[in-house]
Amino acid sequence: MNKEQILALLRELGDKLEKESCVAVISVYGGSAIAMAYCDTRTSNDIDFILNSGDWRIFYRITESMAKKYNLNDKWISEAVEEIVNADMKNDFELLNYGQLGGLIIRIASAEQLLAMKIFSARIEKDSDDAVMLADQINVRSKDGLLKILNKYFKPESINQRNADDCISVMIDYIERAVKK
């Protein structure tokens, strides 16, 4: 899904929530957040989000009906990111207000926070292009700068556990080399 498709789906979701007299607040992460706010050419297979408030029964009934209507995968809107956000990240970060579409209030992760998440994921094949683009966009060009961002958003014990096989270090080295070119 590109930016326009993501926003069209969220707009329809918001309109349907509004018809149900329901307001939901979501936080958007991952590729969908990048497509929505940081890179117009980025696409995503799903919308990674956390439902912060609202009636989850109504929310999921609507998203399930939209999946059937548009022949979307069951995970077109996915809360899988919630595990990482709640278990591994510090919870003192701010999300950016993206806007309101009908009964849907959308908050979005900052470019810096998304970069930290891409570093933490340490999936060079999948996340390196996004990580390099985000690092370049926020003008972070050194290993120290990348580590500072990672440590700002993630718990030290989560970083240590995740980096047991140096996968985070490899990702940071890759990003640093790419943004210095």
Image (cartoon, helix red, strand yellow):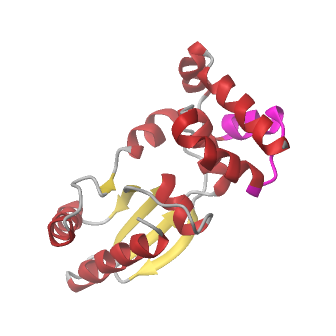
User: x and y percent of residue 41 in the render?
Assistant: 57, 66
Depth check: 54 or 121 in front? 121
Q: Is residue 16 left or right of residue 28?
A: left
Count numbered badges in the picture: 0
User: x and y percent of residue 173 in the render?
Assistant: 74, 29
For image coordinates 46% across by 69% down, the residue present is 106
Q: Which residues are magenta?
A: 137-152
Magenta-drawn stretch contains 150: yes
Q: Is residue 161 left or right of residue 135?
A: left
Depth check: 29 or 17 in front? 29
Q: Is 70 rendered above or below residue 165? A: below
Q: Is residue 115 left or right of residue 59?
A: right
User: x and y percent of residue 42 in the render?
Assistant: 54, 61
Place residue 77 in its image quadrant.
bottom left
Q: Is residue 7 left or right of residue 139?
A: left
Principal secondary structure, stretch drawn in magenta? helix
Magenta-drawn stretch contains 6: no
Place residue 95 in its image quadrant.
bottom right
Position of the C terminus, as image quadrant, is: top right
Q: Is 83 rendered above or below residue 167? A: below
User: x and y percent of residue 101 in the render?
Assistant: 41, 81
For image coordinates 54% across by 25% down, the residue present is 158
Looking at the image, which residue sits at the far top? 165
Position of the N terminus, as image quadrant, is: bottom left
